[in-house]
Image (cartoon, helix red, strand yellow):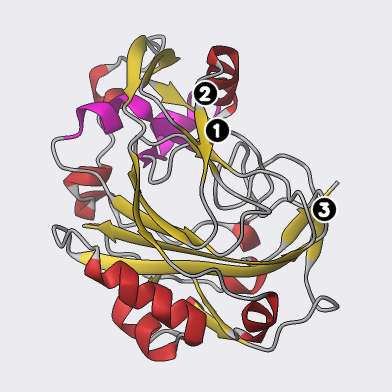
Amino acid sequence: MSALTFLERARSRETQTVAPFTGEGAYHGSTKARPQADAAPRRQAADDVVDEMRATTLDTLAPDAPIPEFDAHFPNRCELVEQLAVPSQAALAAERTTFCWCPLADALALASPITHAVLVAMQRRLAGHKRFVYVDSKLQYFERGDVPVDSQHWHVDGSISVRGPRVEARGHGVMHDLLARHQAPAIGPAYLSYQSSSHCATRFVGEPITLRLPALVPNFDGLDRAVRERDPACLAQPAAAIVRFDGLSLHRACAAEDAGWRLWIRVVETDREVVLDRDIIACYGTVFRS
């Protein structure tokens, strides 16, 4: 197993890493380019891209053609699949191991008690239709107002990103192919998510919505504005609940309403093999403070 995919250490309020909140994004809901040291995990080479992550929109456009808009439909599936017992703050503080794109089998072998119990429950709920299953997790101590990532933008996980000369010619380092996700020839990635506490709950859009959006976007700024203008019904993930969602489920991080520990775990089923080539987990549990 790769040492880049897990981190084992004692936790305390005093050693919680804190960074200024900028709204620029960090791993989830990213809106702007990140320094190389904070870059996302290495993606597959273009000739190895699996269908679920295949960007197609630029292939249909002339180099100087404007990016078209389309009616993007978000079913916003978010299903509560299991309700577990809420762990105590003391038990959470005793957890030691967190993960970043760690294969599920490795994570089960290394996981601390609460995380292990959650992963066992999640394993029972896997669809089993993808080649790989990965685990991400964070254990963070929040003061009131802290945010778990450096963004509160509405976004989707597993967006289809495209890089290279054609994107750079349009003035960007990366673009998200929203149209390709809606037209993908393969079923997209599937997710299970858990959070131990309700004081910093992820919010999901709770109803289907259709938004007029560009087919390709360099960030989630416009998507976030469109969702906020629509002001759809939303729901907060309950404490110690496992929910199932997919790559067309809009959600966002929220600021903590109270102080305390929160364990967040996400399992993704995907056909895309992820091999980390740099250590990003050391900053994966940072909290962001205004």
Q: Are marks 1 and 3 in contact (CB under 8 Å)?
A: no
Of mark 2 and mark 3, the one earlier in the sequence is 3
**Looking at numbered disc 1 in the image, what kind of residue is underneath it?**
Trp
**Looking at numbered disc 2 in the image, what kind of residue is underneath it?**
Leu
The local secondary structure at tag 1 comes to loop
Q: Is residue 115 magenta?
A: no
The local secondary structure at tag 2 comes to helix
Q: Position of residue 126 (x, y in %)?
A: 23, 63
The local secondary structure at tag 3 comes to loop
Q: Residues within 10 Å of mark 2 (few under 14, many from 20)?
A: many
User: Which one is in front, 43 or 74?
Assistant: 74
Q: CA distance from mark 2 to mark 3?
A: 27 Å
Q: CA distance from mark 2 to mark 1?
A: 7 Å
Q: Where does label 3 land, which residue?
A: 144
| 150 horizontally vs 181: left or right | right
Q: Residues within 10 Å of mark 3 (few under 14, many from 20)?
A: some
Magenta segment range?
Answer: 160-184
Q: Residues within 10 Å of mark 1 (few under 14, many from 20)?
A: many
In front: mark 1 or mark 3? 3
| 265 horizontally vs 77: left or right | right
Q: Where does label 2 land, which residue?
A: 223
Residue 89 to residue 177: above or below: below
User: Which one is in front, 10 or 88?
Assistant: 88
Of mark 1 and mark 3, the one earlier in the sequence is 3
Q: Are marks 2 and 1 in contact (CB under 8 Å)?
A: yes
User: Which one is in front, 137 or 21?
Assistant: 137
Residue occupying the point 41% across, 73% down: 118
Occupied quadrant, residue 157: top left
Q: Position of residue 243 (x, y in %)?
A: 38, 52
